[in-house]
Amino acid sequence: MSKEIKAQKGNAIIVGDMKIGEVMKKNPEAAMKLLKMGLGCGGCQFAMFETLEQGCAMHGLDIKKVLKEINK
């Protein structure tokens, strides 16, 4: 995953190759958004090791759509 797949929310930019735990730290609303999209990663033990892109792939989600939603 390249960093060009990104969007901006204020000053916080969430990209697909960020660890899920890092995403939730940067954007606390992300946990609820991910849960609504079918990614229950907030409580997952792999959240600190798995990237957002990997999580999306494991759950059959489109990373571009997820990034768009998280960065709204």
Image: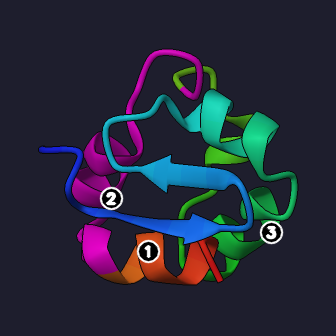
Image quadrant where residue 5 sits? bottom left
Q: Which residue is mark 3?
A: 32
Say what secondary structure mark 3 lies in: helix
Q: Is residue 61 visible?
A: no
Q: Residues within 10 Å of mark 2 (few under 14, many from 20)?
A: many
Q: Which residue is mark 2?
A: 56
Q: Which residues are magenta?
A: 47-64
Query: Residue lying farthest top?
Result: 49
Q: Which residue is mark 1?
A: 66
Image quadrant where residue 51 sits? top left
Position of residue 50 measured from the top left corner of the image (x, y, whole percent): 40, 27
Taking 38 as reference, is 16 left or right?
left
Whether 70 is drawn above or below 48: the answer is below
Whether 40 is drawn above or below 26: the answer is below
**Sequence-wise first label, 1 or 2:** 2
Q: Give, as a three-letter code, the residue at label 2.
A: Cys
Question: Badges 1 and 2: C-beta atoms under 8 Å apart?
Answer: yes
Whether 10 is drawn above or below 51: the answer is below
Question: Badges 1 and 3: C-beta atoms under 8 Å apart?
Answer: no
Instruction: Kindly identify the residue that appears in the image at 61 percent across and 46 percent down.
Output: 41
Position of residue 29 measured from the top left corner of the image (x, y, whole percent): 85, 64
Instruction: Kindly identify the residue that appears in the image at 79 percent across and 35 percent down.
Output: 25
Q: Give, as a three-letter code, the residue at label 1.
A: Val
CA distance for labels 3 and 2: 15 Å
User: Is 63 part of what is drawn in magenta?
Assistant: yes
Query: Residue lying farthest left?
Result: 1
Residue nearest the observer in this picture, 5 or 40? 5
